[in-house]
Amino acid sequence: MTDHFDTLETRAPSDREAALFGALPSFLDKATRAAPALAARLAGIDLSTVTDRAALAKLPVLRKSELMAMQAETPPFGGFANLGALAGRRVFQSPGPLWEPEDDSGEAARATARAFFAAGVRAGDIVHNAFSHHMTPGGFLLDAGARALGCTVFPAGVGNTDMQVEAAAALRPSVYCGTPDFLKTLLDRAAETGKDLSSFKRALVSGGALFPSLRADYLSRGIAVMQCYATAEFGVIAYETAAPDGTPNPGMLVNEHVVVEIVRPGTGEPLADGEVGEVVVTGFNPAYPLVRLGTGDLSAVLSGPSPCGRTNMRIRGWMGRADQRTKVKGMFVDPAQVAEVTRRFPGVARARLVVSRDGAADAMTLQVEPKPGAVVDAAAIGTVLRDVTRLGGGVTIVEPGALPNDGKVIADERDYEK
């Protein structure tokens, strides 16, 4: 596929940089007038001089742990939202918890439409949207992008596997969007019940790792799957593109509505192309102006242009976490949530959440080390774990002193090469 969503994707890189950084000073001026926390962080800086990446790199990085603390201190948005621009918008809560106002300026929808288009989706396609429409923004984000492209959307949401299979068999959608592993759940259940889901030909997935073995399994079933990298704060940050034979090109294209930097973890120092570091993003959402937000995700810049003809920066995609905040079944689990679980049980000395794979699906187990002489209830802990994280997981009681004293609260043991 060699066509593109619009001419912005193929403009000269220098023209893109000029457009983004030409707009940034006035955006920062308006944003600091409307968002007091942002104004405080950028106080004393001549915003009119932030006209290139070198100047942007001098601004402080806001990390999600800081944002979470500021939102707790000054709820709900920590002083980073333009409260005057929220009328008529939705508000979401992501795990952490973090509050995010909806970006309904149209730019987030266009950004998502780019990802769908690059995945081969076109106007007139029927999209089965299996992202959540409750609390978190994923379902609405993908809905807006597909409809902006001219698709018909079925808001399937999460869970209710049998009902979703019945609906897909009747509606005959050609496109699935959702987490990478849930599509396999639907296909396997359809095979068990004799339902025909052969209408699925393409998929756009996010919210979890698309393992090579899983992508190959889908391809063997006649489904070309592409993935995008998205966050609740910015929407689709980067997306895969397809070669002429439909296979994915190396890396992911950064979207047109954000500035992406790769910095040394724990600092704001930009790294050279190819070096792995934290993804830091600056957006242009007037309702929620976030400048140099550290996502906590790791990636690296791929040098050279994409074979697809698009000219923006490429990143290698999601390469793990710069912190221990980990995505499980499309939802982030934070060390603070593990701490909250253990806080409710005085007999627990330490705990470690181990994330693994159960077949093609994510699984998590909380390893609990009791205090000497204490007796803890694994079933009760499991109930609280589900309540706090909104995800089910096993609980294993280990001997006192069995957990390593290394400060690790969440251990991601998934193999991303298989």
Image (cartoon, helix red, strand yellow):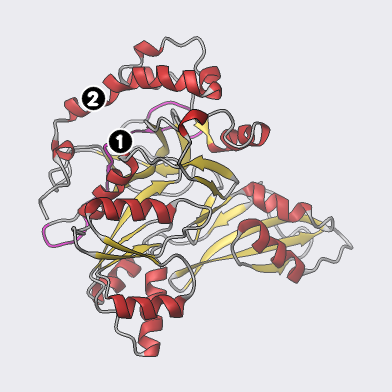
Is residue 397 visible to the viewer in this orientation of the structure? yes
Residue beneath disc 1: 257
Badge 2 or badge 1: first in the primary sequence: 2
Is residue 211 visible to the viewer in this orientation of the structure? no
Whole-percent x and y of residue 173?
27, 71
Of the pair 312 and 48, the residue shown nearer to us = 48
Q: Is residue 345 left or right of residue 322?
A: right
Of the pair 383 and 270, the residue shown nearer to us = 383
Q: Which quadrant would residue 291 be assigned to in this image?
A: top left
Q: Magenta includes 341?
A: no
Of the pair 27 and 65, the residue shown nearer to us = 27
Label 2 to label 1, Cα distance in Å?
10 Å
Which segment did they paint magenta? Answer: 244-270
Whole-percent x and y of residue 45?
46, 11
Residue drawn at point x = 17 percent, y = 26 percent: 15
Q: Quadrant of the N terminus?
A: bottom left
Q: Is residue 275 above or below residue 154?
A: above
Residue drawn at point x = 34 percent, y = 40 percent: 300
Q: Magenta includes 251?
A: yes
Q: Secondary structure at mark 1?
A: loop
Q: Which quadrant would residue 263 be assigned to in this image?
A: top left
Label 1 crowding class (10 Å Cα cut-off): few <14, some 14-19, many 20+?
Answer: some
Q: Is residue 274 above or below residue 324?
A: above
Residue drawn at point x = 30 percent, y = 19 percent: 52
Q: Is residue 251 left or right of residue 183?
A: left
Whole-percent x and y of residue 237?
34, 43
| Amino acid at circle 1 | His
Residue beneath disc 2: 19
